[in-house]
Amino acid sequence: MAEVLLINRADIMRITGLSGNIDEDKILPHVMTAQDIHLQPIIGTNLMQKVKDLIEDDELDDAGNEYYATLENTYITPTLVYLVMWDFLPFLQYEISNGGINQHTTENGISASEENMNMLIKKFKDKAEFYGNRMSDYICDNSSEFPEISAAITGGELNSEGQQNMGGWVI
């Protein structure tokens, strides 16, 4: 079964204004890792799986799922887009292939300096933290609508309670 991604290339392009010629195969793997590494510790395994199940079953917009739809569309999407960009940007100019690691050069411009690249990465991280904090507030304010955040934790699942991420987010 394919991994359910909570955002797609169109979301990334729409929210960030990223150039339309970015290869989807280069950016979508970062969606999966950003979901696992950054988003899952914030919202917990159970809530993330619930949202994935609703998307996979095409039930997100069904009656009774309004809080999940709002969580996904208003909070998860922008947070995850900026988390993906935070992860993806350092890899943008590199390609790993059988021939080794190659750095792309531009024909129509000048490659960004390391200082400028770090500044952009920090900007994406700052935006991810802003939207992530809004998402955490929404979940906390509506915790009775998300029973998954207090469900018993078993195995390798992450509970959002007490989990901290890059900005010290705690739900």
Image (spheres, grey):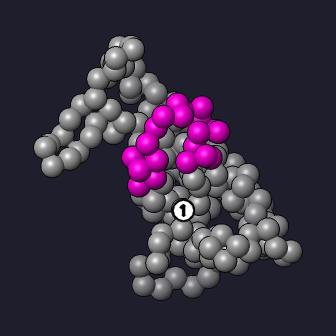
89 vs 48, left or right, is left
Q: Is residue 119 visible?
A: yes
Residue drawn 33% across and 39% down? 91
Could you tell me which quadrant the C terminus lies in? bottom right
- Residue 110 point in image, percent of width and height: 35, 14
Answer with the quarter of the image where residue 101 lies.
top left
In magenta, the rendered stretch is: 9-29
- Residue 108 point in image, percent of width and height: 39, 14
123 vs 67, left or right, is left
* Mark 1 surroundings: few (<14), some (14-19) or many (≥20) residues within 10 A: some
Q: Is residue 149 above or below residue 89?
A: below
Counting the numbered discs, the total is 1
Q: Is residue 165 magenta?
A: no
Amino acid tagged 1: Leu
Answer with the quarter of the image where residue 115 lies.
top left
Q: Is residue 87 visible?
A: no
Label 1's element? loop
Q: Is residue 132 above or below residue 40?
A: above
- Residue 147 point in image, percent of width and height: 70, 78
Q: Is residue 21 magenta?
A: yes
Is residue 60 or residue 141 the one in the foreground? 60
Is residue 145 or residue 75 the one in the foreground? 75
Is residue 42 or residue 58 the one in the foreground? 58
Residue drawn 52% across and 50% down? 168
Residue drawn 20% across and 47% down? 97
Residue drawn 20% across and 35% down? 102
Q: Residue furthest top?
A: 109
The residue that label 1 is drawn on is 5
Q: Residue furthest right?
A: 63
- Residue 166 point in image, percent of width and height: 47, 48
Q: Main secondary structure of the magenta part?
A: helix
Q: Residue furthest left?
A: 99
